[in-house]
Amino acid sequence: MRRFTFEEAGDGFIPPSTADFDLPPVFGNSEFTTKPILLVFLSVILISVFFVLASRKALVVPNKLQFAGESIYAFVRNGIGQEIIGQEFMRFVPYLFTLFTFILTNNIFGIVPILQFPTMSHVGFAYVLAVFTFIVFHWVGIKKQGLGKYLKAIAFMPGVPKPVYLLLTPIEIATFFLVRPLTLSLRLFANMFAGHLLLLVFIMGGDHMLQGVIGLKLIAPFAFAFGIGMTFFEFLVQCLQAYIFTLLTALYIAGALADEH
């Protein structure tokens, strides 16, 4: 596994960059054995094991593990699915629940010792999740309204003067078929990428200062303190981004289910 390094140039140092996110294979020469890919598989294993253990011996009075699992499920089921989608929410809960736990786990990897890499800081993973959501909410809309009616509702918003369609129709088509999946994925990617880069700057910058002159050594503890503070802040961002991605997915599904959107 590649270590983050800072090469000295005189008394300065080269800060982390996008190159530090391009990790080589952990073993072998295959691109499928890089750290991000292995973390994705690890997240699937961890999520599966956790919820199997949490639900294996369900009790009327839940133990701590069961309570934790049920709390996460109830949060997605009631707080996102039922609240946003409404009457037909239950058939979408499995997807929303899987989406939330998968993104959350892979985000939190960024602050877990040894692992210390948020999988979603690689934009390809965020793109794939956005494509799944894109397919789901369009499929839902087409199945409920029929292809022609669904596309007509997107291109020609009801109650709008006809001349306005010249401007509004291209915007609506771009919004539903391009802007939504792009913003959904890029928001998640950008937050994970930027957050991890900031953590590297503070922590590795502090480590570099310790190797410098006495003045820099006195400043180093402040850099480490900022890094620790940013770690807690990053945890909040990681949870928030998992929630926002799942919430927007539920909103898109709810819009597709509506007779007019």
Image: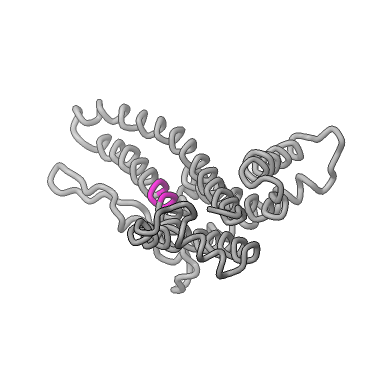
Task: Identify whether 7 is placed above or below 155.
Answer: above
The reply to whether residue 42 is visible in this rendering is yes
Q: Residue at x 46, y 39 (%)?
A: 237
Image coordinates for residue 116, horizontal then vertical, percent:
46, 47
Give the colour scheme of this rendering.
one colour
Give the left or right position of residue 250, taking residue 196 as reference. Answer: right
In the rendered image, residue 159 lying in the magenta stretch gets the answer no
**Residue 122 visible here:** no
Residue 191 vertical placement versus 157 (above, below): above
Q: Position of residue 26 (x, y in %)?
A: 47, 64
- Quadrant in which the N terminus appears: bottom left
- Provide the residue span drawn in magenta: 187-192
Q: Is residue 122 above or below residue 244?
A: below
Whether residue 188 appears in magenta in the rendering, the answer is yes
The foreground one among 152 and 79 is 152
Q: Is residue 78 above or below residue 130?
A: above
The one of 204 and 198 positioned closer to us in this rendering: 198
Q: x%, y% of residue 230?
A: 40, 34
Give me the residue at 31% from left, 27% from top: 222
Q: Residue furthest bottom?
A: 29
User: Looking at this rendering, what residue extends furthest in the left direction?
Assistant: 10
Q: Is residue 3 left or right of residue 39?
A: left
Q: Position of residue 219 (x, y in %)?
A: 25, 27
- Return the residue nearer the eye: 50 or 192: 192
> In which quarter of the view is residue 213 placed?
top left
Write down the quadrant of residue 23 in the picture: bottom left
Q: How many marks?
A: 0
SS majority, magenta:
helix
